[in-house]
Image (cartoon, coloured by chain):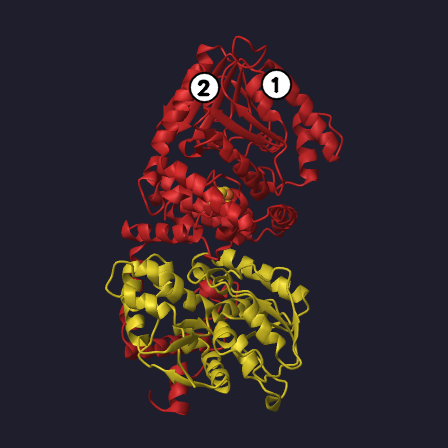
Amino acid sequence: MNAAAEAFLREAAATAANGELHQIVRKGVEHYDAAVERGRARFLDWEAARQRCRKIKREAIDRLDLYLEEFERRVNERGGHVFWAETAEDACRYVTDLAARAGVRTVVKSKSMVSEEIRLNAALETRGIKVWETDLGEFIVQLREEPPFHIVTPAMHLTRRQIAALFREKLGGVQTEDPQELTAVARRELRRAFFSAEMGVTGANFLVADSGAIAITTNEGNARLCSSLPRIHVAIAGIEKVIPRAEDLALLWPVLATAGTGQAITCYNTLVTGPRTASEPDGPEEFHVVLLDNGRSRLLADPEQREVLHCIRCGACLNACPVFRTIGGHAYGTIYSGPIGSVLTPHLRGLAEFQHLSFASSLCGACAVVCPVKIDLPRHLLQNRRNAIAAGLRPAQERTGFRLWRWAMENDRRFTMFGWAARFGWKMARRAGLAGTALDPARRWTKAREMPEIPRHSFRALWRKTHGAG
Amino acid sequence: MKEVALFIPCFVDQLLPEIGMDMARVLQRAGCAVNFFEEQTCCGQPAFNSGYWQDARPLAERFVRVFSRAEAVVCPSGSCTAMVRRFYPDLLAGTPAAEEAKRLAERVFEFSEFLVNVAGVTDIGASFPHRVTYHDACHTLRELGIREEPRRLLRGVRGLTLVEMANAEECCGFGGTFSTKFPMISAAMGETKAAGAERAGAEYVTSTDPSCLLQLDGILRRRKSQVRTIHLASILARTEADGTNSGNQE
Ligand code: SF4
């Protein structure tokens, strides 16, 4: 087992036993569920909306090259720059070089999972640049020096009390647990940063091909400040974020808001079309868009799993996932967690190191039901598993086990014999007092659960007795 | 009279045979002629879900062959039914068995949907004077779209009070080999579910999937809970003549 898989097992087991965390996460999810239910009811036909969103994303992904080039052309026409980053390193280098050239000392950032993916903050900090996360949740986890817990609600795992304690420790002299007052404290800190920053970094929820605009959605308005106050605005987005037309936002915006938080529409929806023009009084002097591949084009080349690129990062599948609810976001040890993380990470960062995530699911299918772009997440988990076996990434013991199992199952007499032997073996083990000990052959089951009473007869034996041989 | 062939999942055959017997009894009472093809073994789901499609495929082909002569196939597990109906097309795509599998998929039914939608039965004359909660097994609900059928059958049982859990549709954490690959996650999910059944004030939790019940039974007994598990077929097999004592896992 590799280090990532071992860490996952350890962390997941620890958080699975952490009742307090479950309570916090569950409370958040229940609140979310109620809001989303009301949100969906606002649609005349939520199913039709999902279908339509899927169609839009599919159209974009199927002709990704054309739409991206159109996007680039339009951005260039307005005086913006587009950089195609093949890897995380390429993307970081572009942004840090740009910052160094312009003498940037402070960067303000709005929420961007892609910037987490490429570890931009660390790259900027090693060049001596101070980075401020300006989304409240991101600001909190940045103070805690930990990654976001959830792709939409990064501080979901924290109580008000914990946040108050954090502010007291890190920001000095804050004596309140009132959420409004805590927010005011953060705002005061962030305002100073906004006015001193020379560069603003944002993500992009959508890249609009026909208008060369980026669409950003927030509830705090911080992305607007990041993209308008500093002299330089850099937007970073995965290449899969492109959509064909501005009018597609009429559906994608409300659907993203509903699936993400249950809102009818998120508070601030901004379209940024480029640097300040001669006739405009304000806005950034420079506008850069970094288009990140980082493994995405490999997915694009796979017709079976290409639809994973439809994802709009709404977070709905995380909230619906009973595994996520049980182990939380940090245990995954990845930037993207929950069902989409377990599907995507092996593609972005290698199947060899991250295949274990695709196995860490009961395949309950709750994620597929809520996904607003109808990604069949359980199918992709199954396909990742199949690919891991085909690539020889599972233990030889398991492989041999399944081969033997298949041999037994290919013949009903062998099946009967093996079944009998297994039942007999377990009974003997129990009689010998092995149940629950280190030698218990079923200890991976019995550690937390009782075994069923083992019946004397199999079904086929009972059937024969009552109905005669078939 | 409708002829039905029993699809007895391998683990039901070996570990929970009474569920199969109870299902056969109920089907007979519903007026079906019941057959059991002894050649059947396993549908291949454990290998398929674990990624061993190469090992699952011959078993799927074998299954299709064994059941090709059946008019209707009825299974006490929503998950195994879903394997044949929803996942065989993926698994057998491009093989000679694909066509036959597609035809078979239309004749394979989960037990409760067969009773309600095919046999047209919602009251089988059962009696079970207990407070019962229904666990929506994941594949029954989300792969087969069965939500109301088992509840309608339960409402038709004499003396039975159906109480709902707040988390009725949440996974029990079994997930096949997931339960032993990640026992701590699986068990914690089971605990959440079990707590839901307790909060609902149920004496019994029932379902259309014996594997969920295996998991919940293991969790509930370890918790020393008062709540017990029983398969839907075992409730429906109970009549007034049987008295009030019951439970397949006592
Ligand atoms: S996979 Fe679907 S549900 Fe999950 S984050 Fe992406 S769009 Fe949302």
Residue at the image point whose x is 41% and y is 25% from the top: A71
In this view, the residue farthest toward the top is A278
State whether discs 1 and 2 lie on one chain.
yes
Q: Is residue A4 above or below residue B248?
A: above
- Label 1 or label 2, whichever lies nearer to me, is 2
Seen from the viewer's position, the closer of residues A438 and A55 is A55
Question: Which chain does the numbered disc 2 sit on?
Answer: A
Residue on which the image places disc 2:
A288
Does the beta carbon at disc 2 come under 8 Å from ligand 1?
A: no
Residue on which the image places disc 1:
A193
Q: Colour of chain B?
A: yellow
Residue A156 coordinates in the image, percent (x, y): 61, 41
Q: Amino acid at mark 2?
A: His
Question: Which chain does the numbered disc 1 sit on?
Answer: A
Q: Amino acid at mark 1?
A: Ala
Q: Which mark is residue A258?
A: none
Residue at the image point whose x is 66% and y is 33% from the top: A166
